[in-house]
Image: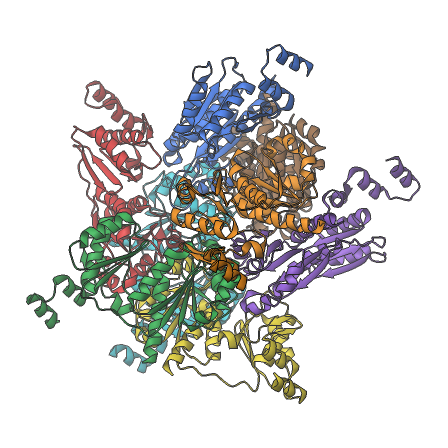
Chain colours: A yellow, B red, C cyan, D blue, E brown, F orange, G purple, H green
């Protein structure tokens, strides 16, 4: 602790970062940020933009970058992204946006590495943004990501053609909307743990992702599931498994 | 009409049967029976035993046999079946029970014939009684029934092994509980009309057949669907389609 | 396969079309398109515009026209239609829009023919767009479509006046919102297979089409059902039945 | 009030009946009974047997007979009915049971008379017990009841045959389960107020009466509705309307 | 019929009105209008603007005015109202809008009269537009309307102060959102038939009117109910009851 | 701690009680019992009998009595009560059962005292067992309980007659099933905090207590609510409030 | 009453305020305002802006300030706030807005005082506006408010760090979205009454606050609950409890 | 394949086992058994007893033991267990029953070994049977199981006391009913992947496990989830993860 305080005194450590290292969380303009989560949980705290003002999002992003080297923001819209852009404009942090997911990386952030592969599968075009959330998290953690798009069960050949590739992954994330049968079909073909992600595509009865969710929960094969559209959560869970595998392999 | 009345006078036709032919429906002890439905709709009125007393079931069965040559009873339990047994004991009508489905055929009932094949598929053992309802209706109508059991998607080879056989049917009924993915997978493999029947197996969220129902309604392939456990309705719909095909082929 | 490759080399066949013939699906800018579905399933893959960007829709439409001769797009809005218009502007493909349904036909696409009639019935004005989807699919497949609008059960005479016409169809699609009683009433009057389409008109409890859906599933007559507003699916199912009838009649 | 008390003193009025006349309600062994409701509301308080012990039912029945001349008990089972039988055994009150509805009438209860007719319609056999509740209430109030059973829409002729008879009623109660279309069809044919009663027959999705309830609420004709299986409530509402008509006619 | 045709020939009757008198319904640009409903059902067909284009609404309104003398339009927004305004601009039909309800009356429409009073009660300010629908229908039918606003049960004195006035109505419509207790409380105080209208005010669990709907269906007093926000239906049902009372009083 | 261990050594304290005092919880045959909860939370841990075997219930009851002086058991059936009876037979602990609630008190348990009154109100007879749970908890905590039964809003006079008595309570628990309007009406009449308890009486739509629950959550007055039938929780919450009042008054 | 009328005559009391004092409620342009509620219930009537026009909100606010000294407006948007601003512009009433909550205080309103502390806890940033409603009500009533933000259970240390501070409150309001576990965890740590407020943050299944609501109702500790996002109701309930405590302490 | 057939010929391999090795599945009296699943998926096919007759269960168990060395049967009742007992009586297969889970092991089945630890946690006594399913599967696969019972969050010390032990597991299964907060709390404390299992304990709204399910899906920490009461599925998923870890460590 003395080291930290001396580093602050010497101007080598910002007060925010010092607070994060000492208390675990930082109190910014837009609430507390759980800076120690990455340490404690092995996965960073993401900033869910939905339900927050653009200013709150930008403020939390700044805190996140300062204390943990990068910010992961999910479900951001154009207005929120612009606020983040403004906040970091002129600095040396890089911004990377994929659909509604935005990552800001500080210049001094070193890439992580993880000796494990996450297979990331989508059933169709509309599942893309949900898979993007998972991909960003896995890549941030240093896992290899093998993404296979558009292999929905309506044209089963598209799925069967990929079995070998699917088998090589250490853990699979499978995103599917409508009836959500793809994770069930894949989990019947490989001996890899499969995490199903229901997607809120479709319309009519069950079209809000509830058909896919209940179908995955009722699967006659073995799956575990995250909430509708929760690509970020699936990515984090895959990282935790990948890290356990990585640790065992050392 | 004169013919009918003279036949009654001559004792060649029972009053009940005469009423059925003249008015279309017959008023028995347990309510009206829609004797003309087979004529009008091409499918007979079934007697849903659930919610009726054993006596009501037996009475309606007697009316059905007298006016249309046979009675189709669904969702019957042992007590109801015993009441029917009592009612027809000593007579020449044959009884055939499959699980909760019971058929009584009058001695003079001639078997129907239909130049069409209904493929009837189940995903697992628990789907059997629901498929039985459909099978009884299709067989009663004279259709060929090709039944393929236990081809659930958890072991996809079991399904794929049957594609040729599935393709040869004129119309397919596919019964599946849990996540109900089987009709979707099959409908992606053949160009036959598929009728999905969700089955109320499973437990937990969606375990009352609702996961299977919503999954079939959301299917990314083309299906039409009947209610949960409604094997009888699926069988009737298949018969109507089979008859249209049969008629066109003449 | 040699033939195909030589045709590509000779410039007689585009690479996209060659890929479609060899692999069954084509990978475009906006994901894979299942070009072989028409062959395999007897019905084409439609492009559901909802949840896709206008660019994705236009790109998939171009792939569809190139590989299968036409594109069927459902649930398209003005922005999406404009993107498609832009994409095909100046070319010889014709565009035909009915409400939220859009068809693009390549110049060399020959009309199909099918010796069967699909009766297409709506209960009221608001059911129109859903019926349009079905009509477009049936017409594309070459079936005769006999459309009867505005025969809701509130004024039963309007329904009863049409019984003869309804009876002449080979298969019936009946679209109805609110309580969705029309398919039940019609199915009690004819011996044709009826496919019910619940429509999300109405308001209050069950007004999202759920009252109509559950009513059709509970129908005391024989129906099979598709999801709420799923006019496209109903049209495809009718085509599959019509084709089976057509095949038997040859 | 003096009169009442003097009558009690003279032994001409029981204390229980006096309390009822003075306070409006009577406190018995099994809770308060709202003896003044018939006066105040024009309809008596019924005793819902479900959820009460047989002893509580019998006790409330005794209080009801003593203070209002009769007891109306709904949803009673055999055990409850036996308890009531025991309670009144040897007395001069008459008991009349129809399925799960039981009426006990004191010897001095004079029949009511009401110059109005309630039409009471059922779609099928299973709707009988619910209609019984309504019939008992209407008859108790002195209304004429014209009951028409088994006119479900699956065989529409059965319904249409009754239009004249339906038109002659002053108010109609229509009980129907499954998809519950009968009240809608009838309300489209007559200019009488129709009260729909959903019945919890059927199975699968919406089979607990919810399909019928939502269908009646969504009806494209004009209906008002009571809860699933609430025959008693429908009967009371019909009585209130009948009494308003009767009053106007005087 | 000859009379009608001769009147058309003589230019005394428009073809549209003639079709309405002969066939009962009229086919306009925007679908069939059930012109005979007022005759047959005693209540006019309303035009539900929701889900229709402004042009369809205006067209149906024109048909309605031409054949029945007035048009009742519910759930209209500003755009729809403008379209109706345009359609009738310059003519002699009067327009009257109350919130989302719009009435157009032809110049030759004679006001109806009905010797009965409908009590119309709201619990709070937000129930106003729903009550407006009911009020317009009742007034159109010639009934007296006694409207009592803002008597919610949170301040019970406001309710109790009105008991005498409530008792004088022949039939009561009570509109209430949130927990919807007002119809229950009122129905316990008077012997008039009460029609409950749940209103979709409130927020959170049950805030879409479902709490009020289920509360009214479960009421421990006697109510009949219409769907959430269905002021028009409640008004029509009240008119049917009022007319029966009026008829009896003649 | 030394004291405790010496008391155990001296045989003055059982090992079980010592464990409870040292660790806060006790591990018995049927799982851990949170003996310190009364100390920590001010309310004891109750034993929910539902879902446990009779042996597990009896074992937990024994642990509870030994460590906290008494056991509160809710939702017990006859079999469970018999097991408890067996366990304590011959000992000096007293048993008191009210419906499905059972209290066992050790001989040395001193009654608590609390200078606050809990008003406990039921709408009807069927709410009794739920109110019993609350009453037992409040009495155990030493609060005065003023119970007022059968004051449902269908006969509003019964409610209004009690306003003074209701006003004298420090906190009110109001149990009501069906539409659950009673807490709303009462909370509009007094300035006491009201805790609503929905009861699962009634039948049909919302009859499992959901109508009452959603009605109380939507109340246009101020209420806080516990789960359906959760009389025990309501009682505990009232005790916590009563204790805060009692503490302030000292 | 004479006093009041004389004060009106003398111009010392406005007619509106006189009506409020005499009748308890005031009829303004936008409906009745329950001016006596604060007196009767101990908590003021709030104006729920949602579902009302800006003019109605401003009008009710004016009535509230005139009769009770201040107006509490919840769920107001910018348009509504502007209307209120306009109404009071130039006057001496102060306006204070926190998110969607707005308070207008008349110049002569004296602050209330209450010797009790309400602990107000949020799990995260998005719970802020709901907590604001509660805070405004408690502060208006004169209670001390100890607000602790951002102590969600994902980083349990943040919660545990606050136990002492939580224990010092007389009553706790805990606002939490997502899974809503925070009130359960807190209620397990302190002996203070806890009121849980589910917040409609999150997305997917249960994301509308239903997961949090059902979790709080099922809590394995003791909680009472208000509806989703009902910060105002929670605040009022806390005030009622605080006032009871305050009263006892005098 | 020749080897297999020669072994059959030589009587060294039963025909059933040979079919299993050649085709992957075996057709017995009660349907097909997926004998190759263990090979293909790394987890065996379990026999879900619910919904099957005792005879079907026993027959499938015999097939399972013969082809894969053991049978895992879930949700078995006493009748089913007796049928299995009868089937294997006198043989050398051992039977082990834990609640509703039954394992039959052939004499020649060698125990598996897996260098990974599954932490298995329950919140309370009623979660035991669900956890038993998971424990049986994990033990069968050779994983070490560290089971920690009764650590529900109502007494948070019980949870916090176990953090070190929880941290040592490679993967955690956490079973919890009621509000299901335990997996959320634990997942916030460790960096191990957590699989949540909602349990259908509790009563009232959400008491069927739906509160716990939706709470786990909404968790503000990272979880993946299986269906309500799906201990078997959670166990299998843990085994797949454990095996991936085990494989990496070799």
Q: From the viewer's perspective, is H171 left or right of F245?
A: left
Residue F145 place in picture, x, y as percent = 61, 40
Q: From the viewer's perspective, is D138 left or right of F54?
A: right
Q: Residue at x 65, y 25 (%)?
A: E115
Seen from the viewer's position, the closer of residues A171 and D185 is A171
Residue H176 appears in the picture as rendered: yes
Residue E137 appears in the picture as rendered: no
Q: Is residue C40 above or below residue F128?
A: below
Q: Quadrant of residue H18?
A: bottom left
Seen from the viewer's position, the closer of residues D95 and C115 is D95
Q: Which residue is outermost to the left?
A: H10
Q: Quadrant of the N terminus of chain B?
A: top left
Residue A184 place in picture, x, y as percent = 35, 63
Residue B120 place in picture, x, y as percent = 25, 52
Q: Quadrant of residue C181?
A: top left
Seen from the viewer's position, the closer of residues D211 and F199 is F199
């Amino acid at each position: 602790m003395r080291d930290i305080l001396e580093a602050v005194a010497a101007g080598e450590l910002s007060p925010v970062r010092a607070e994060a290292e000492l208390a675990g969380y930082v109190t910014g303009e837009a609430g507390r940020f759980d800076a120690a989560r990455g340490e404690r949980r092995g996965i960073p705290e993401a900033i869910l933009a939905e339900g927050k003002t653009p200013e709150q999002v930008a403020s939390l992003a700044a805190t996140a970058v300062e204390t943990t080297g990068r910010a992961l923001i999910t479900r951001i819209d154009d207005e929120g992204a612009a606020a983040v852009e403004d906040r970091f404009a002129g600095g040396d942090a890089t911004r990377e946006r994929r659909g509604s997911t935005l990552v800001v990386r500080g210049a001094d952030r070193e890439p992580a590495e993880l000796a494990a592969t996450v297979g990331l599968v989508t059933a169709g075009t509309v599942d893309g943004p949900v898979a993007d959330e998972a991909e960003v998290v896995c890549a941030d953690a240093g896992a290899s990501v093998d993404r296979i798009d558009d292999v929905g069960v309506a044209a089963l050949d598209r799925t069967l053609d990929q079995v070998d590739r699917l088998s090589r992954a250490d853990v699979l994330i499978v995103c599917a909307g409508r009836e959500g049968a793809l994770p069930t079909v894949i989990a019947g073909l490989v001996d890899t743990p499969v995490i199903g992600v229901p997607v809120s595509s479709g319309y009519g009865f069950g079209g809000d992702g509830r058909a896919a969710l209940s179908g995955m929960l009722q699967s006659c094969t073995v799956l575990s599931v995250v909430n509708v559209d929760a690509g970020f959560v699936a990515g984090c869970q895959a990282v935790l498994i990948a890290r356990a595998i990585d640790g065992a392999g050392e």
